[in-house]
Image (cartoon, helix red, strand yellow):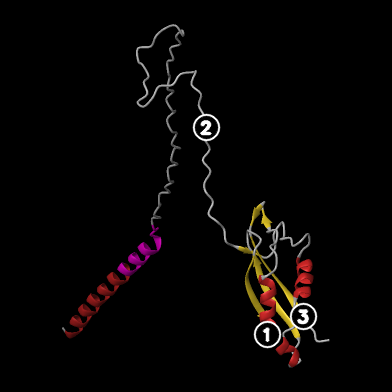
Amino acid sequence: MEIGLVLALALVFLGFEWSKSELEQTSLGTLTNLVGEEEIVPITRPELQKPVIPPKPQAVVLELNIVDDDIELEDDFELDDFEANQDDIIKIIQIEEEEEEDDYVFVLVEDMPVFQGGGLETFHNYIQGKLRYPRIAEENSISGTVHVAFVINKEGVLADIEILRGVDPSLNNEVIRVLKAAPNWTPGKQRDKPVLVRMSMPVKFTLL
């Protein structure tokens, strides 16, 4: 009986092992023979937009009625303020803007100021001939060169005298005195208009 039980158990185990191996072989074979389905992605192309064609402009037709000169028109053209005819003479008046007076002081202009038919050199010689050596400067042996500047205005008058570099008050005052007593100039001009012109020169004092 025991031998029979052992044989029965052995047959049962053998049956289980056989069914298991058959299942594994079938599953493996199924797996190896499977072919994956490829996913096909549809290719989409953007639709080309059609060019927008603007509508053609509509032609505007104007009807002109040509009439004879003898025909009187219904609409009378009237002016509010006055009426003019072909015999009237129209004068065009050109209004010139008043230019503001320009007080700009020039150093160089188209027509430089003129002194007694000459220029700055002639004026320099005139000043040197009119100088009187101050007694206090002579007694103290003071000499040197006074640099002076001045403006010839639009009337030719010498104005705005300025000592740029002086030597002694007595010499400086003598130069100012002679300049103030000098005759008028012919004023300088820029674009044919009198203008202010600034000039400068040295005045020498030399002891003999």
Name the residue tied to disc 3: 204
The answer to whether one can see residue 17 in this image is yes
Q: Is residue 68 above or below residue 205?
A: above
Q: Secondary structure at mark 3?
A: strand
Residue 11 position in % (x across, y down): 24, 76
Pick whichever of labels 1 and 3 is earlier in the sequence.
1
Q: Residues within 10 Å of mark 1 (few under 14, many from 20)?
A: some
> Which image quarter is the C terminus in?
bottom right
The kind of residue tagged 2 is Ile
Give the foreground label among 3 and 2: 3
Considering the numbered disc 1 on the image, is that residue within a helix, a strand or a loop?
Answer: helix
Tag 1 residue: 170
The first of marks 3 and 2 along the sequence is 2
Q: Residue lying farthest front?
A: 135
On whether residue 207 falls in the magenta region, the answer is no
Q: Is residue 35 magenta?
A: yes
Please, which residue is most extreme toward the right here? 208
Image x and y of residue 179, in percent: 68, 72
Whether tag 3 and tag 2 are in contact, CB under 8 A, the answer is: no
According to the picture, the residue beneath numbered tag 2 turns out to be 92
How far apart are the alpha carbons under marks 1 and 3? Answer: 13 Å
Instruction: Pinpoint residue 205: horizontal percent, then vertical percent.
Output: 77, 82
As rendered, which of 141 and 96 lies closer to the eye? Answer: 141
Residue at the image position 43 percent from the left and 18 percent from the top: 62
Horizontal and vertical percent position of residue 2: 17, 85
Q: Is residue 207 above or below residue 158?
A: below
What is the crowding at mark 3: few (fewer than 14 residues within 10 Å), some, or many (at least 20)? some
Compared to residue 64, the image places residue 168 above or below, namely below
Q: Residue at x 42, y 30 (%)?
A: 55
Q: Give the magenta range.
A: 23-36
